Amino acid sequence: MMARPYCLVVALLLLAEASSHGEGVSNPGFVVRVTRKGLDYARQYGMATLKKEMATINLPDLSGSFKVGWMGSMSYEFKSLRILNFLLRNSDLSLRPGKGVTASLSNNYVSIAGNWKVKKGFITLQGTFDLSVDDVSISISLNVGKDPSGRPTASVDDCSNSVGQVSIHTSGNLSWLLNVFHERIENKLKNILKQEICGIIRQSTTTHLEPYLQTLPVTLMIDKVAGIDYSLVGAPWVTSEGLDTPFKGEFFCQSQCSPVPLDAPPIGLSQEHDRMTYFAVSQYVFNTASQVYYQAGYMNFTIRNEHIPLDFPIQLHTKSLGAVIPQLSRLYPNTELELEMSPEAAPFLKFSPGNVTLIPVMNIQAFALLPNSSDRKPLFHLRARTNISTTISVRSGRVLGSLTPGSKLKLELIHSNINFFNVELLETIFNYYATYLIYPTLNAKLEEGFPLPLPRDTYLNSLELQIHKNFLLIAANID
Ligand SMILES: *[C@@H]1O[C@H](CO)[C@@H](O)[C@H](O)[C@H]1NC(C)=O
Ligand SMILES: *[C@@H]1O[C@H](CO)[C@@H](O)[C@H](O)[C@H]1NC(C)=O
Ligand SMILES: *[C@@H]1O[C@H](CO)[C@@H](O)[C@H](O)[C@H]1NC(C)=O
Ligand SMILES: *[C@@H]1O[C@H](CO)[C@@H](O)[C@H](O)[C@H]1NC(C)=O
Ligand SMILES: *[C@@H]1O[C@H](CO)[C@@H](O)[C@H](O)[C@H]1NC(C)=O
C-alpha cells in the first residue's frame, strides 16, 4: 500500500529540482502544478517508506582489539547488529525557487541491538547490548531534469547527514570493560550509519523513483488517427508555490498529414493552492486535436436519405424538399438527394473566462443522385455558420467534451445550379439534420476523450474545472 504513494511523493519531489525554466522554447500546451499541499502529501508517504527502508540497513560486525591495564591486549567483537527502531520524527520540505526541493529530516532516533564478545587467551566473555543514537539529521536535495526522450529524470544531488549522541547499554560479565572502548565503537557506528543512510536514499531513488517517473507517458495513442505528445518541453521548475512541469500537449497524426503550425498561447496560472495539483490544459491541445481530426476527414459528413428517420417530415428526396425548393421536383422528379458537409477550416476553440466558444463555418453541397447511374448532379453550395457551445468534463483521468448547438444554423447561398431559392426555409431542415445526425456522431467521439499525463496508479479526486483565458484548469487532489 505504501509503495505507490511513496513513489508518487518522490516523483512529485523529484519533479522538483529545477534548472531554469523554459530554455526559450515555445509555450507548453499543458502544465502540471503540484502545490505545497501536494508535496506535503507526498512527503508523508515518502517518510513512511523511508522508515521501512531504513530498518533494512545492514550493519556489519565490528571487531578489533584493545589494551586494558594489567590484562594486556584483548580482542572484541560486536555481532548480529540489527536496527530495532528507526524513528523519523520531523520532516520538512523546502522549495528553493528556480533551484530545487530539499527534504530535511531532523531529530531522528535509531535503536540497535546486538551481541558482544571479548576474548583473552582461553577466556571468552559475552553478552548483549542495546544502543541508541539520537539527533540523526538527514538533508536530501533532489535534482530533476528531462532526458532526451522528454521524460522527467530524478537524482539525489546532495545527501548529507549527521549523527548525534550514541549511548550503549551492555549486559553480561565484565560489561564494565566495554565502557573502556565506548568511544571507539561509537565512532565506528556513526560512520557506518552515515554512509548507509545516504546509500539507502540514493538506492531508493534509483529503484523506486526513477522507474516510477519513467511510467509517465511521453506519447499516448488515442485511436487509429491520433496520438498525443506529452514530452516535457523544459525541465520542471520550482516556484515559491510548488512545482510546475511543462508538457508539450500536442496532438499528432499517426499517418500522413501536414498540420498547420499553431502557436500555444501563454498560460497564466493563478496562485491557487487549495488542491494538491492543478492541470492547465491550453486551448492549443484542443486545437491541435481539431486539426488532426479535420485533416483525417472526421468532420466531413455525407448525408443521404437513408440516414433520415422515416418520421421526419422532410426527407432528402425531391418529392419532399420540392416543397421548399419548387424547381427541384421539376428538374429532378422522384430523385434522392445527397448532402456533403465539411468545415471550411479546422474549427478553432477559444477559451475565455467561463466559456469555450467554437464558431465553425461549414460548406454544404447538395447533389441529385441520378437513378440507374453512379453519377450525381451538383445542385447548390451553401455556407453555414453556427455557434457551438462546448462543455468539458474530466472522468477517470480523461478529458471529455460535449457539444450542443449554441445557435441556429445561418445559411448563405454561395452558388446554385438550379437558380435562386429561399435559403431561410432550409435553415430549420438543416438544423434538424445537424442536431440529430452530426452532433451525436461528434459527441460519441468526444465522449472518448483523451488521457491526462499521469504516472502509473495515480488517481484524481475532488475535481473542479474552470475555464480561463486560453486554458482549462483542472484542480484535483490525488490518491
Ligand atoms: C558472571 O559469571 C558467573 C559465572 O560465569 C555467573 O554465575 C554470574 O551470574 C555472571 N554475572 C552476570 C552479571 O551475568
Ligand atoms: C472533406 O471534404 C472537403 C470538401 O468536400 C474535401 O476538400 C476534403 O478533401 C475532405 N477531407 C477528407 C480528409 O476527405
Ligand atoms: C459565456 O457564455 C454565457 C452563456 O452563453 C454568456 O451568458 C456569457 O456572457 C459568456 N461569458 C463571456 C465572458 O463571454
Ligand atoms: C432504371 O431502373 C429501374 C429499376 O431498377 C428500371 O425499371 C428502369 O427501366 C431503369 N431505367 C433506365 C433508364 O435504365
Ligand atoms: C455567434 O455568437 C456571436 C457572439 O455572441 C454573434 O455575434 C454571432 O452572431 C453568433 N452567430 C450565430 C450564427 O448565431
Image: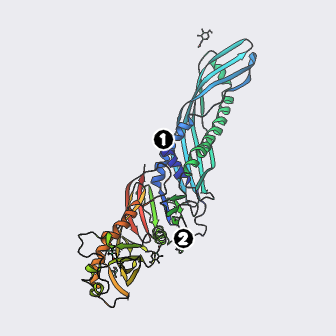
Callout 1: helix, strand or loop?
Answer: loop
Give whichever of 142, 68 is nearer the camera.
Answer: 142
Residue 139, image x and y in percent? 59, 46
**Image quadrant of residue 20?**
bottom right
Label 2, secondary structure: give it. loop
Q: Quadrant of ligand 5?
A: bottom left
Q: Is residue 222 above or below residue 62?
A: below
> Circle 1 sits on which residue?
2
Callout count: 2
Give percent across and percent down for residue 228: 51, 62
Q: Is residue 50 above or below residue 80?
A: below
Label 1 is placed on what type of residue?
Met
Residue located at (60% from left, 37% from top):
164
**Any mark on residue 257, and which?**
2
Q: Is residue 209 visible?
A: yes
Q: Which of 211 and 267 lies nearest the eye of the viewer? A: 211
What is the x, y in percent for residue 458?
A: 46, 50
Q: CA distance from mark 1 to mark 2?
A: 45 Å
Q: Amino acid at mark 2?
A: Cys
Of residues 435 and 464, the one drawn nearer to the viewer in this rendering: 435
What is the quadrant of residue 65 in the picture? top right
Q: Residues within 10 Å of mark 2 (few under 14, many from 20)?
A: few
Q: Quadrant of residue 73?
A: top right
Q: Is residue 123 left or right of residue 351?
A: right
